[in-house]
Amino acid sequence: MNSKLLNIKAITLLALSLGLMTACSNDDDNGGNTNPDPEPTTSRWITVAAAKMGEDPGDGNGGTLLYSVSSEDAKDPNVSIEAFDNGFIAPSNRTARLQSSEDGNTIFNISYAGDTGGNYTKYTVEGGQNFTPTGSQVSIAPYVGTAPRWIKLFDGDKTGAAVYVSTEHEIDDNDTPNDTSDDTYLRTDAKMGIVTLDLENSLIKEFQEHNIMLSPEEEAQGYYIGRIDMPVLNAAGNKLYIGADVRKVDTETLERERDYEMLGSKTIVLDYPSLTNPEVITSTVGYGKTNGYRSINAFEYNGSVYQANQNDPEGSHILKIDADNEYDDAYDFNLDEALGVEGAYILAWRPAANGKAVLAYRHDGSAEGLAGAQGFFALVDLNAKTAQKITAIPYDPNFYLFQYQGFVVDGTEIYVTQAPVGQNGNIYVIETETGEVTKGAELINVQGSHFIGTF
């Protein structure tokens, strides 16, 4: 796609986004005759994120590149997207942590690690490799470090939230500080920090730190919250839920255990916007961690928050937190049962407003590829608690989704990227109402690299 054509499309789409014109299908051009009652179509930018290889295939540590096309071009299999050769380099020492505005016109980025780690920047999307910085920069590193875990809250693109947790074992030395033989493990203290960021004005809104405690019985056994991520607002907008990874230490050796009995899935609940009064709620349905990884892990839908869990010994679940800010343990949605697999692991997911979602997952039967276990997509119905593998998307042992970050939701359609590590692929668009899948633009890959989603 030459640069002249892209510039024309960029100008056209910018005008459209300002409401100055409507786009019509090429089929309307019928020998000069026009439809007296044309049906206007709307378009938005679809930004493809590409993660370049660092030292190993699929590690994504070579930088993140962005390239945007119109939604019409994203659905066109005759369009080629060469993000690695022609894309905009998103500032980040490692894989950038990206978010986009609901209309696709703005990209938000907080650099991850390195000298610029923790720097917040935003860009106006203008087509192709054109991402124009807008507003001022701000660093959240003084609050949550240079490798922050952050997410955009669903409040009209106004607020971002970033979190960290640090841990320290508490030991009773039994009054003999130089003799550790009779030391007694007491608990592990988890100190949580959370900062909210004004995305519109690049300002820090609120910052709080808290010591997060489990029950005395759990802490005495060595359990503690070792990682947190993925804040999400409840429907009322007065509580913030933060996903948690519960870990365990050997109380004798103080070494972290890797094989232990999982506790019920837990979430930290805070008052919002004050970020005060922390409490921990526990599910009796799911037993995995709820902090996710690179992609948003929990979403508000129909008055409740639906949250994925990972590393559940019975396979990943989608859990439900109701308006009373407690887990709804009557809602039992097990992905192993729904998909007919064992060891389902939700890698990333995103629902549309109709309660139907596209979910990236792997399972115990996934092939081992260049960068890890093979991934798949499924169509999920939160109301019916059903999930079905999307077979119209091709799969390959090297189709790697562990680092997947972004899904574009446009009405009832959801856009995803599919390309094995180091191989070409395509954008696919899933109509969640019908399950129909459209094969879209070709994604041109380079050696050892992969695509991490659409924004």
Image (cartoon, rainbow, N blue to C red):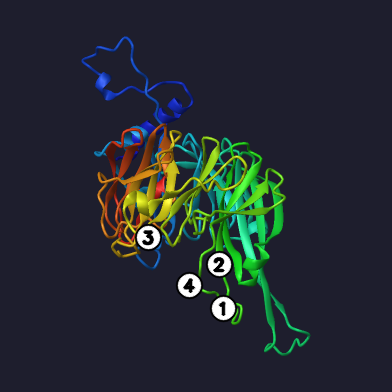
Amino acid type at circle 2 is: Arg
Find numbered disc 1 in the image and state the secondary structure of the residue it sits on: loop
What is the x, y in percent for residue 248?
A: 56, 70
Residue indicated by mark 3:
343
Residues at discs 1 and 3 in contact (Cβ within 8 Å): no
Residue indicated by mark 1:
255
Among numbered discs 1 and 3, the one appearing first in the sequence: 1
Where residue 198 sits, quadrant-wise, is top right
Q: Residue furthest top?
A: 36
Residue at 27% over, 24% down: 26
Among numbered discs 3 and 4, the one appearing first in the sequence: 4
Between the residue at mark 1 and the residue at mark 3, the CA separation in whole angstroms equals 27 Å
Q: Is residue 224 left or right of residue 398?
A: right
- Dot label at residue 247: 2
Within 10 Å of disc 3 (Cα), the crowding (few <14, some 14-19, many 20+) is many
Among numbered discs 2 and 1, the one appearing first in the sequence: 2
- Dot label at residue 397: none
Among numbered discs 4 and 2, the one appearing first in the sequence: 2
What is the x, y in percent for residue 232?
A: 57, 45
